[in-house]
Amino acid sequence: MTARGWLGRGLVPAALAGCALLVGPAVAETEVLFTSANMKDRRAVIADRILDAFAGARHSVHVAVAHFDYRRIAEGLVKLRKERPKLDLRVLLDLGEYAARDSKSTLLERGGVEVRYKTYSMRYHHPMARLMHHKFIVVDGARLATGSYNWSETAEFSNYENAVFMDGPENSDVVADYETEFERMWELGRERYQPFLARLSAGRGNEDYRRWIPIHFSPMTLDRKE
C-alpha cells in the first residue's frame, strides 16, 4: 500500500505522520520513515518496520548492512531461521563487523544465519577499507527497505536517519536492481580466494612475511571460516 495507506490504517505512529511521504505515482507502494521523533519517546519505529518486513518472507531475505549491532533485529533473524529453515536467508556485512565489540554477527552465525564479510585486508585497516556501506534488505525479490539507517540502536534513537520501504509493480525495477547488487556483492572476488591462499602460503618461508600484516588486497566476500 502507499505511505498514505499505511497512515490510514494506523500502521505508522501518529507522531510520525508528518514524516511519511507518498513517492511516485499513486499506485506505487512506498513508505518513508525518519527517526527524528524517536530520540524523545524511544519508539523503535524503523526497527519495528524492518522486523515486519522480513517476518512475512516466503522465499528469501537478503540483507546488506554496514553496521549491525541491534540485538532485537538480530534475534528476529535468528528466530526466522529457526522457524523457516529452508528460507534463503543471507546477511552481508563489512569486515569492520567481523570482530567489532558490539556487532551481532556472531549471534547471527550461532543462530544458523549465513553471514559473509566484504573483506579487503587480513585485519581491519580503515585507510584501506573500501567500506561495504550499503544499508538495505530485499525480501522475496519483491520488497525493499533502504536508506541511511544502519541496524543499530544509535541509528534508531540518537541519529537523524531515514528508511524507505518499497513494494508493488511500480517499484519492481528498483527492487530488482538492489537484488542484483546484493548477489554481485555476495560473490565479490570469490574466484580469487584460493589463488590468494596459495600465494600467502608460499610466502610463509620468507623471514619478512610478518611485516606485511595487515596484507591488503582486492575485495573478496568471505565467511568467517574463510
Image (cartoon, rainbow, N blue to C red):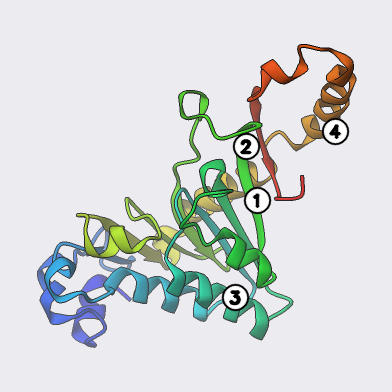
**Left or right: residue 100 compared with residue 171:** right
The three-letter amino acid code for the residue at tag 2 is: Thr
The residue at the point 89 percent across, 17 percent down is 205
Q: CA distance from mark 1 to mark 2?
A: 9 Å
**Left or right: residue 8 compared with residue 127:** left
Label 3 crowd bin: few (<14), some (14–19), many (20+), radius 10 Å: many
Which comes sooner in the sequence, label 3 or label 2? 3
Label 2 secondary element? strand
Q: CA distance from mark 3 to mark 2?
A: 24 Å
Q: Whole-percent x and y of residue 210? A: 73, 20
Label for residue 78? 3
* Front residue (pair 82, 96): 96
Do the CB atoms of the residues marked 1 and 3 lie less than 8 Å apart? no
Label 2 crowd bin: few (<14), some (14–19), many (20+), radius 10 Å: many
Q: Which residue is mark 4?
A: 194
Label for residue 119? 2
* Front residue (pair 25, 105): 105
Label for residue 116? 1
Q: CA distance from mark 2 to mark 4?
A: 14 Å
Label 1 secondary element? strand
* Front residue (pair 196, 84): 196
Which comes sooner in the sequence, label 4 or label 3? 3
Label 3 secondary element? helix
Q: CA distance from mark 1 to mark 3?
A: 16 Å
The three-letter amino acid code for the residue at tag 1 is: Arg
Which comes sooner in the sequence, label 1 or label 3? 3
Q: Whole-percent x and y of residue 181? A: 56, 45
